[in-house]
């Protein structure tokens, strides 16, 4: 089970930046297609809200990879 947690940690560490990349790419495409203030605000809020979530996902993966969740209570 410990090896599974560490493998999942690697996946989570990679998933955070990949998700941010795709979110920013999608936001840029949407802003280019509909360059209005509403679109800028909407996608700006999406990106700003999701960045800390993606960072936390990567941080959680880092701790899982390092074995911080292997300790039994």
Image (spheres, rainbow, N blue to C red):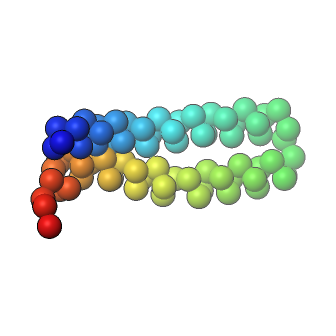
Task: Say which quarter of the image contains residue 16.
Answer: top left
Q: Image point 22% across, 38% down: which residue? A: 4
Percent coordinates x, y for residue 44 in the rendering: 68, 53
Quarter occupied by the N terminus:
top left
Q: Is residue 3 visible?
A: yes
Q: How many marks?
A: 0
Q: Is residue 13 left or right of residue 40?
A: left
Q: Image point 48% across, 55% down: which residue? A: 53
Q: Is residue 6 visible?
A: no
Q: Image point 31% across, 47% down: which residue? A: 61
Q: Is residue 45 left or right of residue 62?
A: right
Q: Image point 34% across, 36% down: which residue? A: 11
Percent coordinates x, y for residue 20 in the rendering: 52, 41
Q: Nearer the viewer, residue 61 or 42?
A: 61
Percent coordinates x, y for residue 62 in the rendering: 26, 48
> Vertically, is 31 above or below 37?
above
Q: Nearer the viewer, residue 68 or 25?
A: 68
Query: Outermost residue toward the bottom?
Result: 73
Q: Nearer the viewer, residue 10 or 49?
A: 10
Q: Is residue 37 left or right of residue 63?
A: right
Q: Nearer the viewer, residue 47 or 5?
A: 5
> Vertically, is 11 above or below 55?
above
> Vertically, is 20 above or below 49?
above
Quarter occupied by the C terminus:
bottom left
């Amino acid at each position: 089970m410990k090896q599974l947690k560490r493998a999942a940690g690697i996946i989570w560490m990679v998933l955070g930046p990949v998700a941010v990349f795709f979110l920013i790419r999608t936001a840029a495409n949407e802003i280019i297609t509909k360059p209005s203030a509403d679109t800028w605000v909407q996608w700006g809020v999406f990106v700003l809200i999701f960045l800390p979530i993606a960072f936390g996902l990567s941080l959680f993966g880092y701790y899982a990879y390092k074995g911080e969740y292997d300790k039994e209570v």
